[in-house]
Image (cartoon, rainbow, N blue to C red):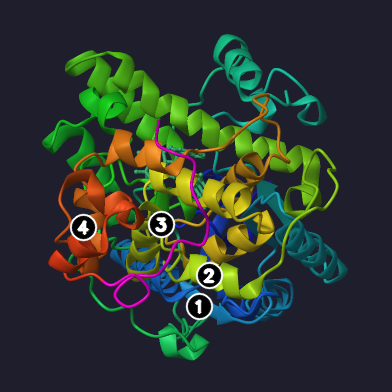
Amino acid sequence: MKQRRIIVWFRNDLRLQDNETLSKAIQMGEEVVPVYCFDPRHFEKTELGFPKTGNFRGKFLLESVQDLRNNLQNLGGDLVILRGKPEEELVTFAERIQAGAIYFSQEVTAEECYVDKSLEKNAWAKGIATESFWQTTLYHIDDLPFPINQTPEVFTQFRKSVEKLSSIRETYPQPEKISFPEKEIIPQAGVMPDLQTYGLEEPESEPRAVMVFEGGERAGLRQIHSYIWEKDLLKTYKETRNGLIGEDYSSKFSAWLALGCISPRTIYEEVKRYERERKKNQSTYWLVFELIWRDYFRFITKKHGNKVFHIGGIKNLKDSWRRDNAVFQRWCEGQTGVPFVDANMLELKNSGFMSNRGRQNVASFLVNDLGIDWTWGASYFESVLIDYDVCSNWGNWMYVGGVGNDPRENRYFNILRQGKNYDRNGDYVRLWIPELAALKGFDIHQPWDLSTIELQKAGIRIEGTYPQPLVDLQSAY
Ligand SMILES: Cc1cc2nc3c(=O)[nH]c(=O)nc-3n(C[C@H](O)[C@H](O)[C@H](O)COP(=O)(O)OP(=O)(O)OC[C@H]3O[C@@H](n4cnc5c(N)ncnc54)[C@H](O)[C@@H]3O)c2cc1C
């Protein structure tokens, strides 16, 4: 039986296209009321004192919510903006407008699940139904060829299993029409907050950033179109994906995926269409392969719950980490004295983004070379990354920290060798550490090996212009 009025609570699914929650509400409700609730807990400080949402992601989030609002307005409706705890605000609002049900997307981590449970409890106490839907992943949870508590621990087993025994559902089309309530029911749809509301500053524009990330579904769909079709980059993805500089070496879909401005199934369908219409090769497969990594971390988090945040990780390993705040701060600030690490950390700090190659290296350096608590690194990334995704971030950090499911024992990255392989001429380091720019070729990766005269010629004074390295690194060979 149809409900008279259904609230759609948008969370990390800020889109109209391929949105099951919205599509089901349109199907089941005579009227649909889209709502976004800004939860102040998302803007609190972490235990280490970082804002949970830093200014890059804060800006991207506001743009994404605004874009959703514009898209709903174009369909003749609006997005209601609430502020406060969703488990309370949504129920009060539902009572006020006499909505019979609240629909929303499921999340997998503790804080979000607590909100879901509380919302359900509060809503049911007032006679308001709730229904939640699985979104976010390429493979639907109900289509997995194993129960979630038997998700294979090793990625390759997971991937082979889903590829062989499961299939990817079709996307939901973008709704052409939504029946919104009359204006009298919701005379004021609420005002959008701004960055200042949450004590965040407008990020400064950074010409060296890989690209300008603009939040929202329309910008996300434009990025898919640009990367796959206009620039025709998909066919070389596998060869370029380990790059460090510029917009084109990888897809840059992650920020839009993290807030659900685009869905992985939409990307998948575009990849399949590209394979039919232009080219099918290892690169076209590899983008899907990476999206399966993303799925894997989400399902592993669903399986293991809070363990992914624990110091011992999934493996329950003993805590033998170092907690030296001064050293950790030097890592955060890009002042370790190891140019390849510092360049990446400066990119992150100044632009909110870092390549996958960079993330692997700086994470390995923090945990393996400096021995610092891996959860500190994950917590800093959570604050600063524009594309922060709770499962991908903590899952990858667990891997690097050696407390995840990686069957390979040693996840040590030899920073100098990595620099040699991925930044042989030092262009990336030169871009982010101009103090070292006069050093030629690979010399820029190991200034400590140069004589005082050579350094002087390049205008560099160790401990003056650039710090002494925090550790002696293994040689590049
Ligand atoms: C320590 C560490 C922390 C990370 N934190 C995050 C995070 O918070 N959010 C996030 O989206 N990714 C995270 N990643 C994964 C990866 O670095 C980014 O997804 C990628 O760099 C984003 O750029 P892209 O969209 O151009 O990626 P592409 O290379 O174009 O890949 C396409 C998509 O595949 C997915 N993907 C690719 N690699 C991975 C991976 N290793 N794990 C999970 N998904 C992947 C992403 O959704 C990505 O957008 C982290 C990796 C490491 C090593």
Position of residue 353 in the picture relative to residue 319 (left or right): left
Location of residue 453 by image quarter = bottom left
Give the x, y percent position of residue 12.
53, 56
Query: Alpha carbon of mark 4 to alpha carbon of mark 3: how far?
Result: 13 Å
- Most foreground residue, 79 or 256: 256
Query: Alpha carbon of mark 4 to alpha carbon of mark 2: how far?
Result: 43 Å
Instruction: Determine whether the residue tagged by mark 3 lies in a helix, strand or loop.
Output: loop
| Amino acid type indicated by mark 1 | Ile
* Residue indicated by mark 2: 36
Residue 432: say if magenta.
no
> Marks 1 and 2: CB-CB under 8 Å?
yes
The residue at the point 67 percent across, 73 percent down is: 86
Residue 476: say if magenta.
yes
Give the x, y percent position of residue 270.
30, 29
Mark 2 and mark 3 lie on one chain; the one further toward the N terminus is: 2
Which is in the foreground here, disc 2 or disc 3? 3
**353 relative to 245, above or below:** below
Instruction: Determine whether the residue tagged by mark 4 lies in a helix, strand or loop.
Output: helix
* Residue indicated by mark 1: 81
**Disc 4 packing (10 Å; few <14; some 14–19; many ≥20):** many
Res. 430 mark: 4
Query: Alpha carbon of mark 3 to alpha carbon of mark 1: how far?
Result: 46 Å
Mark 4 and mark 2 lie on one chain; the one further toward the N terminus is: 2
Residue that extends furthest to the top in the rendered view of this protein: 164
Give the extent of the magenta segment.
461-477
